Amino acid sequence: MKRIKIYMISLNVYIFVFFLFTCGCRGINEGDFQDVINIEQPSKLSTHLQNKVISFIKVTNGETVIYLTNLAYDRPKRYRLDYLVHDVDISPGDKFITYVQGENVDGNIHQALWFYDLIENFGTKVASWEKDITEIVITNPSFSPDGNKVIFTVTWLETNNNGLAIVNIDGSELNILNTNSPLNEGPRISPDGSHIIVTCAGLDAATGYPGFQLCLLDKNGLFRKQLTNRGDLNSSYYFTPDGKKIAYSEAEFGGIFKIIKKRKDRFIVMDIDGKNKVEILNWDIAVKGFSDDSQEIIFVSRPDKNSPRGIYIINIDGSNLRHLTYFDAFLEEWYSDIESYY
């Protein structure tokens, strides 16, 4: 697959205000949590976690780098694509990736969704439109839980329609979902395939200002419920493997009016209907995975902006916070030439 130059553009998103509902948060810790347990050797980690694989992705020096490792840190793999891509997602089983890439066609940039086999080192274009990126933009693909499909956001700029599409990994059965809300970014499908979670537009109940919230859709993309109504940006959101809860990161930084001086971060777990929100940390986090029984969350974070990033594990109720210190040297190297990628 040949190298293709990527042209990035800025999208102007017009925020539509959804109705408000009460937060219903409980169990707020606000920094009052147990001491961090340092795990200095993989052998000290629970056996059921040692084989869990986590991934890191960055774009630097004109190439895309993908790093996979189990938590025992004895089977690391590094892959390099000698071209720039964006919005990379890794399949269940960690053998494939999907990403968005642009192609210069007679002076126009056409975006396409790609499927790439990491083992065979071979890429396939699975979805595209013969339209310039000033007309159609593709963003944020993610694999279905069974790894057989990819769901992604498609924005038709001429009509300001921000919808969803889903396609088989062999490029067959491209289907535009019948969405009915104006913003549907970063879709993720629930483990049983019955629901989709997306970034949507909504108000921060505390400030009254617009922000990026989380919404629940049905399997066909139709709006069902706004799940959050606090913070300026809710991100790094994932269904737990049992499909019962959603873990996500919430950031509050004053929105477009900058009404607060200090950014506030919260890591929250809630039921998939948005109820029973429990704040388990007040750190900025990036979820990396879960234990098979959905009771432990693996993530990258740092206690404050002056601390180095680390790999942590916490129970879903906020207890037993562990820092895998044997990853610290790798993370220092990994983040040495980037700042905005997890």
Image (cartoon, rainbow, N blue to C red):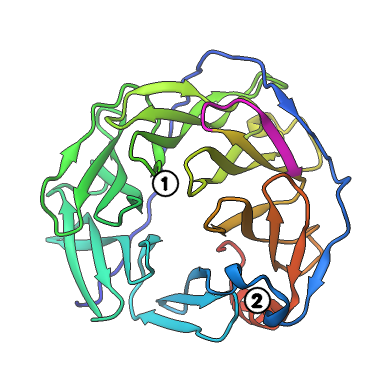
Q: Amino acid at mark 2?
A: Leu
Quarter of the image holding residue 307? Answer: bottom right
For numbered disc 1, what is the local secondary structure? Answer: loop
Q: Residues within 10 Å of mark 2 (few under 14, many from 20)?
A: some
When the figure is inspected, residue 105 is found, relative to residue 206, above or below; the finding is: below
Q: Amino acid at mark 1?
A: Ser
| Residue that label 1 marks | 10
Answer whether labels 2 and 1 touch (C-beta < 8 Å): no
- Left or right: where 29 falls relative to 229: right
Looking at the rendering, which quadrant does residue 121 occupy? Answer: bottom left
Q: Is residue 206 above or below residue 267?
A: above
Does residue 104 show up magenta in the picture?
no
Q: In which quadrant of the rendered image does the C terminus lie?
A: bottom right
Horizontally, residue 157 falls left or right of residue 51, namely: left
Give the camera-side residue of 324 and 137.
324
Q: Position of residue 251 (x, y in %)?
A: 67, 41
Q: Residue at x 33, y 39 (%)?
A: 193
Q: Residue furthest bottom?
A: 74
Q: Give the secondary structure at mark 2.
A: helix
Residue 264: tell me if it is visible. Answer: no
Looking at the rendering, the stretch of residues picked out in magenta corresponds to: 272-280
Task: From the image, tell me which residue sits under label 2.
Answer: 331
